[in-house]
Amino acid sequence: MAYGIDAFSFLNRKCKILILAVFGTILVVTWATVNRNRTVLENEGRISQRVLNDLKKDVEKYNIEVTGGAGFVGSHLVDALLIAGHEVTVVDNFFTGRKRNIEHWIGHENFELLNHDVVEPLLLEVFVCFEGFIDASCVLVLYTVDQIYHLASPASPPNYMYNPIKTIKTNTLGTLNMLGLAKRVHARLLLASTSEVYGDPEEHPQSEEYWGHVNPIGPRACYDEGKRVAETMCYAYAKQEHVEVRVARIFNTSGCKQLYHASTGGKTPNIISFKMLNVAIAPHYYFQVYGSGQQTRSFQYISDLVNGLILLMNSNFSQPINIGNPGEYTIMQFAEMIRDAAQYCLPPGYLAPGLPECPSKKQFQPIYVLIGGKTPILNLNKMQDDPQRRKPDITRARTILGWEPKVPLNVGLNRTIEYFKRELFKSKKSKLVDL
C-alpha cells in the first residue's frame, strides 16, 4: 500500500489533477443519470398509484415491446413501464417520434431502442448452430416478448395526411408484421386504435358497438380506414391463430411531448398547437378555428390515457374499449379556454405591431409583448370530413377496467400550455420544434 502511495507521489501535478478530474466527471455523470431517471415525470401527471401498485405486485416483470415508443403517447407509456420495473424495447423509425422523448432512458439496463420501420418485418428469432463431431445442429432462439403495445402510426391529421400511402402501409402492413411477431413469440398485442374509426358519427355518444360513418375515399380515410383494417386483422389473428389481442380506441389527448410545427423561418410560430383540436395561436397571433367552431371534442390528459392502456393490456377483456374523456366541449370553447390560459410574453425575435407590452418588463430585456387574453379568434374554412361531434361512451372502461379520467380538463390544458411555453424558448431558431 505504501508503495502505491509513493508511486502516486512521483506523478507530476498535472497528471494528478487530470486523474482527479476524470473521477469527478464520472461521479457527476453517474449522479445526473440516476437523478434524471428518478425524476422523469417530475412535471408530468404521473401514472396512478393504483396502476403502479398493481404492476409492482407482480413478482415476474414483463419484457415489453412498444412500437412508436418515441412518439407522444408511446414515450409516456415507456416512462410508466420502466418506472414499474419492466424491460422495454422501443421500436420507432422517428417519422413523427423524437429521440429526445426517450433519451433519458438510453443506457438504462432495462431499456433498448431499435431504429426500425414496422412496415418491414421485425425478426427477433435467430438460429444458433453448433458444430458436432458428425454434423452441425441448429437451435431456434426466440427473443422473449411478453407484451406488444402497437402504437406506431402518425396520429394527427397534418401528419397522417402528409404521406397517406405511408400511413396506410403503417396501419396495415405494420400491424400485420406485429401480429405475426406476436404469434411467433406468443406475446399479447394491444392495438392503439382510434376514435376515428367512428368517422363523422351519427350516434352520440359513441359506444364500442357503433360501426361508424366513414368516408372511404376522403382525405382522412388513410388513417380512419387504416385503423379499421388494423382492428379487423387483430380479430382475424385472434380467431385463426389464437393470438391474444387488446384494442384501445383512443379519443383526443393532450399533454407534453406533442409535435409542434412552426411557420416558415421560425419568426412567427404557432405558440400552442393542438392539431387534433384545430385550435392554434397562429401567424399574426390570431387563434385559428377551422369551421364554425361548433364541432365538439372530448380531451383527456396523457397520464389518464397511459393508465387506461396499461389496465387494458393486463385485463382479460379482448373486445374494443373506448379510452377517452366524456367531457364534451365545442372547439370554440376550447379556443377561448386556451386563449385565456395562454397569456404569454414573446421573446424579442417575435415582436409584432399592435401587441401590448408585458406588464413585468423588468425581467425581460428588451421589451417583450403579450399574447392571449383578448387575442382575436379567426374562423378558417371547414376541413373536409371533420367530425362534427365526438364524445366517448366509457361505460365499458368503467365496468371492465375500473378506469375513468382523473385529470380535469383545465389542469391538463394548463400543463400542456406551460410545456409549450418552455419549448418555444428552446427552439426559437428551429423551423420544426421537437416536442
Image: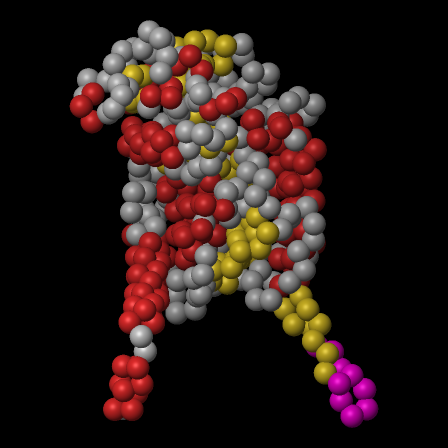
Query: In which quarter of the view is residue 210 placed?
Result: top right
Specify start and end residues of the magenta stretch as a single range.
Answer: 131-139
Q: Residue at x 70, y 49 (%)?
A: 120
**Hey, which residue is sitting farthest top in the picture?**
354
Asked whether 135 falls inside the magenta stretch, the response is: yes
Residue shown at 45% from the left, 15% from the top: 283
Colour mode of the rendering? secondary structure
Q: Position of residue 187 (x, y in %)?
A: 58, 60
Closer to us: 361 or 124? 361
Residue 371 quadrant: top left
Asked if residue 156 is among those painted magenta in the image, a careful observer would answer: no
Q: Is residue 89 left or right of residue 413?
A: right
Q: How far across and how far down the image is residue 423, in percent?
A: 38, 34
| 182 with respect to 37 (left or right) | right
Residue 137 or residue 313, whichever sits in front = 137
x, y percentage for residue 363? 20, 27
Is residue 182 in view from this perspective? yes
Occupied quadrant, residue 126: bottom right
Residue drawn 44% across the image and 37% down it: 435
- Whether residue 325 is visible here, answered yes or no, is no
Residue 316 vertical placement versus 325 (above, below): below
